[in-house]
Structure formats: C-alpha cells, structure tokens
Amino acid sequence: MNPTNITVHAKSRILEIAFEDGSEFEIPFELMRVYSPSAEVRGHGPGQEILQLGKRDVGIDGVEPVGNYGIRPVFTDGHTTGIYTWDFLYKLGRDHQQLWDAYLQQLHAAGYDGDTGRDPSAAAHNAKPAHGCGHHH
C-alpha cells in the first residue's frame, strides 16, 4: 500500500501519513525511533532487540526517500540507519496504541518507574556502546 501524503511536523514531533486506502495516521517520532527497523535497534535476530531509552524529545531533521517503497528518517539523535517501508509505517500507525503500551511495559520491566525511561537522562544513565550488536553500521 502506498502513501498519498506524508508531512513531517517538526514542532509537534509527528509524522502525518495518508494511504491510498483512505487511512490516515499521526505517528510520533518517538514511536518511530524506538521501533526503528534497523539492526541497531532490532539486533540481528529474535531476542536481540535493544530497548531504546531517552527518546521522548527526539526529532527528525530530514527524510530521505528509499526507492519507491519507503523512507529513511534522519533523527536528531544521529540515528539514520532505519529504512521505514510503507507497510511498516502503516503498521506503526494502525497499531500505535498497542505498540506504545508494549514499549512502556518494556521500560517498566527494565526498572523504570512511570515513563522515566523516556527522559533523555535515562539514556545517559544506561549508556552502552552505540552499536550494541558489536558491528559498525
């Protein structure tokens, strides 16, 4: 399914996207960042996912097209390796609340009270190498 419109709202940190089936979604940059399809976030296989911390205020500096099938956002925290296909963006929009709830549960399971794991200071307190899988991407 292809998008008919994409708008990056820098101030509200929302990606607005409409698809040819009439669906329209507002996807927070933070949700996009913590569920990035990159190996840096997902690892190289099931169970290797790396919990993303401190992304509450993440922005997008730009969006690069990737063929006819997706985009590569340039996040303000330097993350640039995720390719977001149209299908993946549709899923993020459609399943926004379920994904968000799962993320907050993961933060809680990791020992963060409330949503404190979303604060930029959380990443500094739990600093790990930028490429947790050991490869340079």
Image: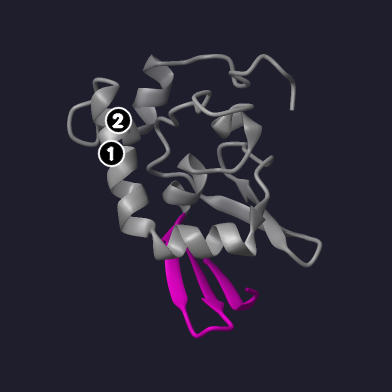
Magenta stretch, residue numbers: 1-28
- The secondary structure type at the circle numbered 1 is helix
The vertical placement of 90 against 21, above or below, is: above
Residue 39 found in image quarter = top right
CA separation in Å, label 1 and label 2: 5 Å
**Are discs 1 and 2 less than 8 Å apart at CB?**
yes
Magenta-span inclusion, residue 78: no
The amino acid type, in three-letter code, at marker 1 is Leu
Residue at 73% across / 64% down in the picture?
A: 69
Can you say whether 8 is above or below 134 in the image? below
Q: Which residue is mark 2?
A: 107
Magenta span: predominant SS is strand
Residue pictured at 56% horizontal, 78% vertical: 19
* Closest to the observer, 49 or 82: 49
Residue 133: percent from left, percent from top: 63, 18
Q: Where the C terminus falls, by quadrant?
A: top right
Q: Residue at x 24, y 36 (%)?
A: 115
Residue bearing the label numbered 1: 104
Q: What amino acid type should be assigned to the residue bearing mark 2?
A: Leu
Find the residue positioned furthest to the left. 114
Element assignment for label 2: helix
Q: Position of residue 83 (x, y in %)?
A: 68, 49
